[in-house]
Amino acid sequence: MQLPEQPKAGAGRESGPWLLFLSSVEVRFGTVLSNPSRIFHMDVPDPILKSGSLIVRRVEQSDIRLLTRWLSTNEVLAFYGGRDKPYDAGRISEEFFQRDGIIRCIVEWEGVPIGYIQFYRCEPKENLDYGFATTESVWGMDQFIGETGYWNKGIGSRLVREMAEYLLSRGAAHVVTDPETWNTRAIRAYQKAGFLKVKLLPRHEWHEGEMRDSWLMEYKRT
């Protein structure tokens, strides 16, 4: 998704670790959203996804300490948010509990919280930038594995594949992701999960003081 010349809130859309990045989904909350263009009628259960060892559930206030630890670690920040913008508990509280149409979740593996994922719907302008019609339902997500001991175990690829299938089953016409071009590990993880490169997005993401190029990738069922 296109970012301005300054970085957005970390719980919005930023670069992330090796398994990061899709582009968008929305839900109507029953209250006024801070971004009224992000409205999509969808019944979202909790937990949102249960598949074997993998659980995706909504973020809770009790997760603030965990998120703060993950997002103040350079290994994670190098991919998600940037090492120049570490989080503290106050920033987590402010950014991760907004009613803006983004569904923010904790990822658990075998009952252990190991990461974060959020999903939301592309706005019409984003659809055009990506080559889709403004009326199409283009969904995506951003995610990271905060517990680095769970990196390189195939969990990230499984997570994004399961979530892509979930979004398609809920009415998405397209599920996309936009890893930065330098993030080859993320790109390989997405390819393993079934995503294909479809478009280069120049100067697309703000990360660590500069705009970075990204690849638009779309999930394709086999």
Image (cartoon, rainbow, N blue to C red):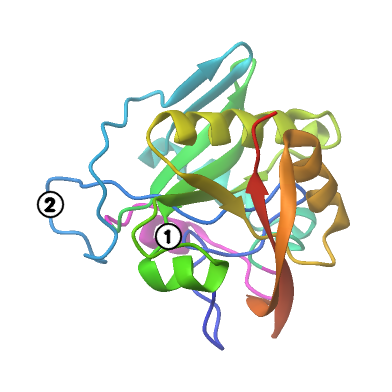
Indicate the secondary structure of the residue bearing disc 1: loop
The correct choice, above or below, for 115 with respect to 17 in the image is: above
Residue 31: give its label. Answer: 2
Left/right of residue 132 with respect to residue 115 in the rendered view: left
Specify whether residue 83 is in view: no
Horizontal relation, residue 144 to residue 9: left or right: right
Q: Residue furthest top?
A: 52
Give the quadrant of the C terminus: top right
Q: Residue at x 64, y 37 (%)?
A: 160
Q: Amino acid at mark 1?
A: Cys
138 in relation to 190, above or below: below
Magenta range:
82-99
- Taking the spot 59% from the left edge, 28% from the top edge, the residue there is 162
Taking the image as shown, residue 7 lies to the left or right of residue 191, namely left
Q: Which residue is mark 1?
A: 122
Write the residue at 65% across / 60% down: 178
Q: Position of residue 130 (x, y in %)?
A: 56, 67
Q: CA distance from mark 2 to mark 1?
A: 20 Å
Of residues 42 and 196, the one drawn nearer to the viewer in this rendering: 196
Image quadrant assignment for residue 145: top right
Percent of width and height locating residue 110: 64, 15
Q: Position of residue 43 (x, y in %)?
A: 26, 31
Q: Nearer the viewer, residue 158 or 31?
A: 158
Residue 175's tag is none
